[in-house]
């Protein structure tokens, strides 16, 4: 009895073992390799690059003082529109002590010489009237008198320039009044009242009192990678998007490509400038971040396939074409333009051919649609 019970239990375990093997085999057999295919289709292929940059005024200048001193009064604010010649600020001139002392000494010497020559001329005028000297001798003293008079006037003018920054008698604009040299919008006023400023001269750039720009003529300034700069040319069209202005694309024309690149984070990039053509009445501020799409090449309604279906053998492209149900053969193809998703097929297949996607396991195929 016990023997029959043991045999029965063993047989039961054997059946369970065989059933388990059958279930595992059945499940593994359902995970077949999925073969996906597609036929070529017509599509526009556009190859483009993106340049990052900002919107800047075409004409932007820094207005500097012609004299050194202290800013007494600022007459404009950022955002003001001003005309050329408008007074921006007034400067209290602080003359250089050494130059002032030298100028005063020169005036004293010139006055002494002038008075001496005047006495000589007057004395010889009297001698000439008494016919003691000739008129030719008198002319020499008159000439010397005029020269000394001119030297005195020059010395006085130099002293006035050092003290006031301008000549009162000349009718010229006072140098202590800083005026706009361009009609436009005041972008920044980097100085405040009471600030010491230096003059602009041959050896010194001088202190910037204000930055003025023509905001009616804006350009895009950006950079392009060196790998694509050879495909870009002047007069190309750009689609420009400004970060601060949503849902609007602006049209631009490429005007300038820098002949020299700059290293930016280890990559050589070239500066480009493009004119904005359709700003209309939009108020665009200087410094807005922007991106520009530049169309490098374009093909309209050409035969393409997804790049995922393209394979390579020793660097040569080919595809697998279905010749019968479940049967495929390799065919070399000639490819053209690619936009990174689709690629143009110039020759090697027909529009009706079904192209096989390279085999991938089921887990990696999840979520993919043909």
Image (spheres, rainbow, N blue to C red):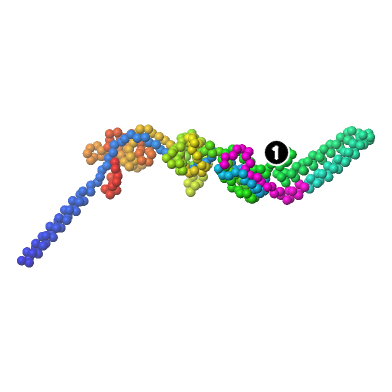
Image location (x, y in percent) of residue 151: 79, 41
- Visible residue check, residue 139: yes
Residue at position x 70%, y 38% in the image: 172
Nearest the eye: 283 or 329? 283
Image location (x, y in percent) of residue 328: 25, 39
Q: Compared to 5, does 90 lie above or below? A: above
Quadrant of the snapshot with the N terminus:
bottom left
Q: Which residues are magenta?
A: 80-104
Q: Is residue 205 left or right of residue 19?
A: right
Image location (x, y in percent) of residue 325: 22, 39
Q: Is residue 87 magenta?
A: yes
Residue at position x 30%, y 44% in the image: 368
Quadrant of the snapshot with the C terminus:
top left
Give the farthest residue toward the left.
1
- Visible residue check, residue 303: no
Q: Which residue is mark 1?
A: 172
Image location (x, y in percent) of residue 236: 47, 35
Q: Is residue 24 left or right of residue 62?
A: left
The image quadrant that residue 170 belongs to is top right
Residue at position x 64%, y 43% in the image: 178
Residue at position x 76%, y 49% in the image: 101
Question: Mark 1 packing: few (<14 Cα in 10 Å), some, or many (20+)?
Answer: few
The image quadrant that residue 186 belongs to is top right
């Amino acid at each position: 009895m016990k023997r029959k019970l043991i045999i029965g239990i063993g047989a039961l375990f054997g059946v369970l073992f065989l059933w388990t093997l059958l279930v595992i085999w059945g499940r593994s057999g359902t995970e077949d390799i999925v073969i996906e295919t597609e036929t070529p289709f017509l599509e526009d292929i556009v190859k483009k690059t993106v340049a990052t940059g900002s919107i800047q005024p075409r004409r932007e200048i820094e207005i500097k003082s012609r004299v050194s001193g202290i800013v007494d009064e600022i007459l404009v604010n950022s955002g003001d529109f001003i005309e050329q010649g408008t007074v921006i600020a007034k400067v209290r001139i602080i003359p250089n002590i050494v130059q002032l002392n030298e100028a005063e000494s020169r005036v004293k010497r010139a006055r002494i010489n002038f008075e001496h020559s005047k006495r000589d001329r007057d004395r010889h005028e009297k001698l000439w009237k008494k016919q003691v000297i000739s008129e030719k001798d008198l002319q020499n003293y008159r000439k010397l008198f005029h020269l000394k008079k001119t030297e005195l006037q020059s010395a006085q003018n130099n002293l006035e320039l050092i003290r006031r920054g301008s000549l009162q008698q000349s009718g010229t604009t006072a140098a202590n009044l800083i005026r706009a040299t361009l009609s436009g919008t005041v972008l920044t006023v980097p100085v405040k009242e009471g600030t010491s400023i230096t003059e602009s001269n041959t050896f010194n750039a001088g202190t910037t009192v204000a930055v003025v720009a023509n905001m009616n003529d804006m350009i895009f300034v950006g950079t392009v990678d060196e790998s694509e700069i050879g495909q870009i040319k002047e007069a190309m069209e750009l689609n420009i998007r400004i970060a601060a202005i949503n849902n609007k694309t602006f049209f631009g024309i490429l005007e300038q490509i820098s002949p020299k690149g700059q290293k930016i984070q280890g990559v050589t990039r070239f500066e480009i400038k493009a004119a904005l053509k359709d700003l209309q009445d939009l108020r665009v501020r200087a410094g807005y971040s922007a991106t520009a799409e530049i169309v490098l090449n374009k093909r309209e309604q050409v035969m393409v396939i997804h790049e995922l279906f393209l394979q390579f053998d020793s660097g040569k492209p080919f595809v697998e074409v279905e010749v019968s149900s479940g049967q495929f053969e390799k065919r070399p193809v000639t490819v053209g333009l690619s936009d990174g998703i689709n690629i143009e097929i110039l020759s090697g297949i027909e529009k009706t051919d079904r192209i096989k996607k390279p085999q991938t396991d089921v887990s990696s195929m999840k979520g993919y649609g043909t």
